Amino acid sequence: MNLGSPLTALKGVGEKREKLYQKLGITNIGELLEHYPRGYLDLTGTLAIKDASDEHPCAVKAVVTQKSPTRPIRKGLTVSKVRATDMERDLLITFFNAKYTVDALEIGKEYIFYGDFTRRMTGGEMSSPIVIAPGESGFLPQYPLTEGLSSKMVSAQMKTALEECGHLVKETINDAVLKKYGLCSKAEAIRSIHFPACSEDLEMAKKRLIFEEFLAFTLGMNLTKGKTRTAEGNAFSPVSIEDFTSSLGFELTGAQKRVIAECEKDMCSPVPMSRLIQGDVGSGKTAVAASCMYFAAKNGFQSAMMAPTEVLASQHKATLERMFAPFGIKVGLLTGSMKASEKAEVKAAIKSGEITIVTGTHALIQEDVEFDNLGLIITDEQHRFGVRQRSALGRKGKAPHTVVMSATPIPRTLAFVLYGDLDVSVLDEMPKNRIPVKTYLVGPELSQRALGFVRNFAKEGKQSYIVCPLVERNEDSLPLEAAADFAEQIAGQELVDCNVGLLHGRMKPAEKERVMQAFAENRLQVLVSTTVIEVGVDVPNAVCMVIENAERFGLSQLHQLRGRVGRGKEQSYCILISGKNSPETKRRLEVIAKTTDGFRVAEEDLKLRGPGDFFGYRQSGLPMLKMADMMTDITLLEEAKKAAAEILSDDPKLDKPENAALAADIRKLLEEAAV
Ligand code: ADP
Ligand code: MG
């Protein structure tokens, strides 16, 4: 048996199972070995019920004492209740649509139950935990599956494959790089990624495999696109921007200062800056952008800042105007919906250099916008733009410096990193005065109370958002009306004494802007909105966010929405209203309620949805990266890029024997990606 052998060479794999594996794209032993787990059940710390935590999933050991009959609660949904004990405390377990699992449980026998745990007076409760026979221990790999395959089967076959062929796995990274970056061998990594002996092993394996993927991608991109950074740019002179930063009205965070310094350094080089600034909502990206633009202005260059929506663009305009007015720097706005005459006026001022800083939407990249001397382009919330659009603006000046700002950690970001050969800066620190938003998850019966809450805030002069997903009227199942009806209704009833505004996607841009402006100036206390407020809007006086039908949003989207409040010095609140809930939905929403850290939210999103969904790479033309949690591995990406540069400087075409295996992998990758 070798890596090229068909799967049927393995015990337990016949033609039928071979077909199932084919569905996962696995046709031989080598490919099976690279079918990595999407997660693990950690049984290393099996707990007594009294020690179980409701913070994260746990493995609880208990003896089944009682099973109530499985019964239907509505069409397509059955529920079964099981009681278990560890002789000290009791565990009440609810299973949904799991008759088979429940039937298989034997009364009087001990099992490990793995999942989220909720503490109760006499013990605890679990909902649809995974049931594990008590003999198992360590980390149980959980694989991406297809119907008919279970992780148990895959893991049994993986064991055999490793025993027979594990030693045949080829090393792809040359010794010097392995040593320099402290990486384990590929064979070792493959073994440990499936069956780690301890968490250190697992970390080692992940690090190695992620590094390899980053390395292959970076090299691949370099080889196909050639050097992207050969263009001549404008090297700015180091100037102090202290006068500007000290006028902001707050002390920059350490992270902001660091990132600004990184950008300044880049801008002083003749190689144009190409940098991604990644920071969670509220981390203060705008101040960083403004500082960079000031730096450019002091060097005598214009800056352009692109935003994904008109609302955002005009908000940026207002913010920047406020910041730059004391320095006599003129800020302009250019959006698609402006009158032709207004546009012409702004364009003329951009061309003459009278406007130093211009913000806008994609109108900015239209062919006929000419700059006097564009030195810096900043793109906010980059993921809304295509790469092509970005480069179109890039052609406007003489190789201007570019910055992309994003609140979405990865993986979209990662795609840009790879596409665009960007350097990465991370704003990993929140402004000090921030008080974490308090988040509550409630049923629709409390919807009225939430509105009462909003009304009280309005009385105190504070503002609120109410977000409801725009639902077509003819959609039968949901009682929620379209946002417009809803706004009208509450404006007439519950919130009759407040000024209520409405913002939705189908409004004309100018209308949207009027409403947004009114809200920003506190002429409206309540803004009823669809998701158009999702990105970027900054109104520090808004302290309450009510989200109707919260289950309709993805986790990261909810996090972005919540990021609209908690921007000032006041305690802010986010109330998620959600009715009919499957256990999965409830779990999802509870994640948001429990954490305010964007990286954790994204991580949980990934866990719950599985990496397949999360990395939409096939569509973007990048082959799927296999390792799931690389989103937290920005540092590793940086190291891999460094290693790639080192390898290429020594072996520009990758034709030295020690890089042959890597070169072969990259060729395969590029073929798959059809770049
Ligand atoms: P985002 O990163 O989501 O774009 P913003 O740039 O809109 O965040 O900043 C959010 C809010 O925090 C703004 O009101 C801004 O004025 C404020 N802010 C930014 N940096 C700081 C800081 N260092 N200290 C206090 N407040 C800050
Ligand atoms: Mg922003």
Image (tube, helix red, strand yellow):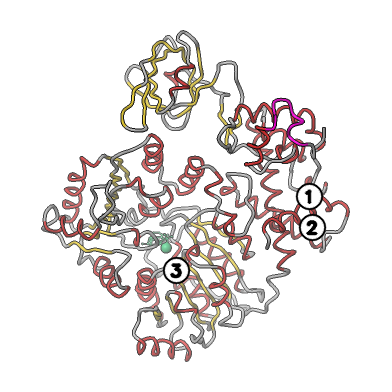
Location of mark 3 (residue): 245
Instruction: Give the spatial CA distance, label 1 vs label 3.
Output: 42 Å
Answer whether residue 497 is magenta in the image.
no
* Depth check, front residue: 39 or 376: 39
Q: Is residue 186 above or below residue 267?
A: above
Instruction: Answer left or right for 267 relative to 220.
Output: left
Horizontal relation, residue 459 to residue 529: left or right: left
Judged from the image, the secondary structure of the residue bearing numbered disc 1 is: helix
Q: What residue is disc 2 on?
A: 647
Q: Residue at coordinates 72% horizontally, 59% vertically from top-left? A: 220
User: Badge 1: few (under 14), some or many (20 or more) residues near its Cα, within 10 Å?
Assistant: some
Q: Quadrant of ligand 1?
A: bottom left
Residue 177 marker: 1
Dividing the image into 4 quarters, which one contains the N terminus? Answer: top right
Tell me the kind of residue under disc 1: Val
Q: Residues within 10 Å of mark 2 (few under 14, many from 20)?
A: some
In the drawing, what numbered circle is on residue 286? none
In percent of width and height, residue 530 lies at: 31, 59
Percent of width and height locating residue 521: 24, 68
- Whether the magenta-drawn stretch holds residue 8 is answered as yes
Q: Nearer the viewer, residue 51 or 466?
A: 466
- SS for callout 3: helix
- Asked if marks 1 and 2 touch (Cβ < 8 Å), the reply is yes
**The C terminus sits in image quarter:** bottom right
- Which residue is drawn at the image coordinates 25% and 56% (left, top)? 473
Dot 2 beta carbon under 8 Å from ligand 1: no
**Over which residues does the magenta segment extend?**
6-15
